[in-house]
Amino acid sequence: MSDASLPLKTKVRDALNEARILVLGTQVLLGFQFQARFRPGFGKLPPESQWASLVSLMLIYLALMLLIAPAAYHRIADEGDASSDLKHLTGRAVDVVLPLLAGSLGLDIALISVRIIGNAGAIALGVLFVLLALGFWVAIGVAHRHVDGGRMNKREKSSLEDKIQTLLTESRVILPGAQALLGFQLAAMLADKFETLPQHLKQVHLTGLLLIAVAIILLIAPAAYHRLAADGEPREDVDAFGAKAVLGALVPLALALCGDLYIVVAMESGSDRWALLLALAALAGFLLLWGAFPVAARHWRNHS
């Protein structure tokens, strides 16, 4: 069966599952970036390596913003229905995220190898892995790319069963990023370096931990409700409850991500002002991609 003959709902679900795979890869890089700053060896790295690590972290943040945006769009703009716009949005997000992850991977490899093979060797190794990732992730796919036309304004009303299955997929798309954050936040509080942080950074960290715990509770809630309340059967209340839980989880997740970014930048730059500016910029990005954009798309669709 060709891609053109697949039902739109199948294409949308496949696109979300592919985004989930990328989030799983992002989870590893995100966890490393946060954990590294509480390791004794990080402070021994050259300043340029530490700043390169911060650039890598920013690439991961942008990747997460883009990868989770389709789930928010699907719930808000499409109201759980399958649409060619969602398929296109997910595809374009993946197109942008792949080079971002390649760049972050290369920077992280250079970061951990600089103390063994020196600056020149680490840079060469990082560039090699960026090119290798771009080759397998981007170049091969682009060379064999075939996109079917006719996506404009195509939308299919999804059955209740399809909506619930897609909802659970969206929860699995978002959950890995939250898991990575929670693991970092719990482990960091046991690190010796955590005790050297100013009190206000400790409080921000604890607040972020509580927020991410709330996000994880909300992301797991739809599956628990589906099984316990409905015994796995498709019901309207499962879809309604699950949609609210998944969208609600995005709020504490975004705030926790911004809080952790504030801590990292404050630790590396020694400037609370720069840390606050970058954290607010990240928050603006989350609000735009996860909130304002899908709300505007829904408003435009309802009034067009």
Image (cartoon, grey):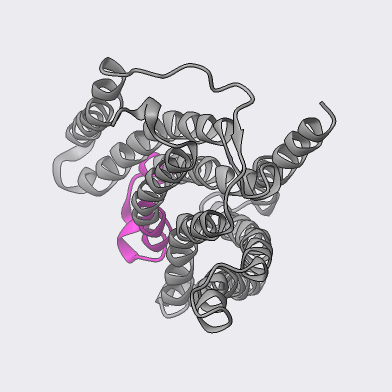
Identify the residue at image location x=75%, y=38%: 298
- Number of numbered discs overlaid on the protein picture: 0
Residue 280 in sight from this viewpoint: no
Q: Residue furthest left?
A: 117
Of 304 and 207, the residue lying toward us: 304
In x, y percent, where is residue 215?
59, 68
In x, y percent, where is residue 72?
62, 48
Identify the residue at image location x=43%, y=42%: 10
Q: Could you say which quadrant of the image residue 239 lies in?
A: bottom right
Q: Could you say which quadrant of the image residue 56 lies in?
A: top left
Left of 118 or right of it: where is 181? right
Image: 24 above or below 134 = below
Identify the residue at image location x=49%, y=34%: 93
Q: Which residues are magenta?
A: 29-51
Of 2 and 138, the residue lying toward us: 2
In x, y percent, where is residue 268?
51, 52
Of 96 and 280, the residue lying toward us: 96
Left of 220 or right of it: where is 124? left
Image: 295 above or below 145 = below
Q: Quadrant of the N terminus?
A: top left
Reply yes or no: does residue 181 show up in magenta.
Answer: no
Residue 243 in sight from this viewpoint: yes
